[in-house]
Amino acid sequence: MNLLGIDIGGTGIKGAPVDLAAGRLRHERHRIDTPQPSTPEAVAAVVAEIVQHFGGAQRVGITFPGVVKHGVVSTAANVDKGWVNCDADGLFTAKTGLPVHVMNDADAAGVAEVRYGAGRGAKGVVLMVTLGTGIGTALFLDGKLVPNSELGHIEVRGKDAEKRASERVRETKELSWKRWGNAVGEYLGRLDALLSPDLFIIGGGVSKKADKFFPFIAKHTKVKVVPAELQNDAGIVGAALIAAEAV
Ligand code: BGC
């Protein structure tokens, strides 16, 4: 089947055809800036453009940075609030004329890592944490996803965790690796206290620079922490995978 994965983020919308046998992209991804404001209509137009750019897709998986239950969005922390209660599956299907399956972005990235990357074969409780514009989480028990865990919004020191430890906070506040690494570590320590996971997988573009901030995490948790392996492609690959299996 010709599958296309599309990852909707706070700053960019990226898509590519996916090879599920290999767990990687078939072509270089196509990226378009996220329209501002990121209303459903404006984002759907960009999604349709990406689908046209590649052509020939039979099924499309799309990630969204909020809670998505059965194709309907219910939260939108870092995108236009017009998404709340939007039937995203219906909107994108109407715009593209193709069967579309929409899911939470961290869930998609986690599914890809557990199938093809850093969580391959991992048993027990695995928590993927994506550090980007916000913080996303994907929770697994013996490889099976518990969708929409939203643990980026637990409170740490009286603040929403993603307001202290997301990659965006590091950039906008120009935090040192040490300061930010400790904030990430403290956050993982809280998750450890709540869930006692067997493995943390850290995703998001910044996972490429794990050597810069992982050293500051160790003192906050004894749980094994590894960087994601599919990095920026995880969302696209996971979206296509979930779409393919959601028949
Ligand atoms: C949203 C999550 C999303 C994460 C990463 C959070 O603000 O609530 O649904 O997975 O950002 O985009």
Image (cartoon, rainbow, N blue to C red):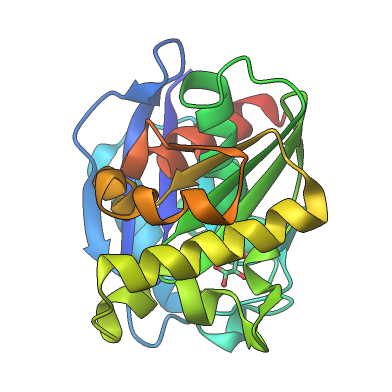
Could you tell whether 49 is left or right of 76 in the image? left
Q: Which residue is at 39% across, 63% downward? A: 181
Q: Tell me residue 68's x, y (percent).
A: 70, 60
The residue furthest front is: 219
Quarter of the picture holding the C terminus: top right
Query: Does any portion of residue 23 appear in the rendered image?
Result: yes
Where is residue 221? Give x, y as percent: 60, 50
Count of numbered tags: 0
Q: Is residue 217 above or below residue 57?
A: below
Image quadrant in which you'd find residue 110: top right
**Furthest residue in direction top, as rendered:** 21
Query: In the figure, 172 relative to 54: above or below?
Result: below
Q: Position of residue 245 (x, y in %)?
A: 67, 25
Q: Relative to residue 52, is residue 114 drawn left or right?
A: right
Q: Quadrant of ligand 1?
A: bottom right
Q: Is residue 196 above or below residue 116?
A: below
- Left or right of residue 32: residue 103: right
Pick the front one: 209 or 52: 209
| For residue 29, side relative to residue 106 (left or right) | left
Residue 6 pos. (x, y %)? 42, 47
Q: 189 or 135, which lies in front?
A: 189
Can the viewer see residue 104?
A: no
Q: Residue at x 24, y 62 (%)?
A: 32
**Residue at the image position 22 percent from the left and 29 percent from the top:** 27
Residue sitting at x 26%, y 76%: 171
Name which quarter of the figure residue 188 lies in. bottom right
